[in-house]
Amino acid sequence: MGILTFILICVGLGLVVTLIRKYVPLPDAVQTLILVAVIIVLVVLLLNALGIFGHLDYQIPKIR
């Protein structure tokens, strides 16, 4: 993932979070939870892009 892709993801997620916080009537606790989840996702993506976190190529086990 390049830096341009990461910037576009940040802008897109920021726009989505802003629209949710502004137009969707949710309790403050839920809005904070959404914001924290987005920040965690961005941190993981940044660490993955820098090669610190490693590759996220984990296989999901199939349930029979």
Image (cartoon, grey):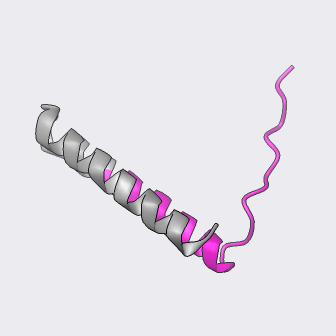
- In the rendered image, the vertical position of residue 29 relative to residue 4, given as above or below: above
- The part of the image, by quadrant, that contains residue 29 is top left
Q: Nearer the viewer, residue 25 or 18?
A: 18
Among all residues in the image, which is located at the extreme top? 64
Vertical arrangement, residue 59 with respect to residue 46, above or below: above
Q: Image point 54% across, 71% down: which residue? A: 46
Quadrant of the image occupied by residue 50: bottom right
Residue positioned most to the front: 4
User: Magenta includes 46?
Assistant: yes
Q: Quadrant of the C terminus?
A: top right
Could you tell me which residue is drawn at 84 percent across and 30 percent down? 62
Asked if the stretch drawn in magenta spans residue 36, the answer is yes
Instruction: Tell which of 45 and 64 is nearer to you.
Output: 45
Q: Position of residue 26 (x, y in %)?
A: 16, 34
Q: Is residue 27 left or right of residue 5?
A: left
Res 40 seen here: no
Q: Is residue 20 left or right of residue 22?
A: right
Comparing 4 with 59, the one in front is 4
Q: Is residue 7 left or right of residue 32?
A: right
Q: Which residues are magenta?
A: 35-64
Residue drawn at x 61%, y 71% is 2
**Residue 11 showing in the rendered view:** yes
Q: Position of residue 19 (x, y in %)?
A: 21, 42
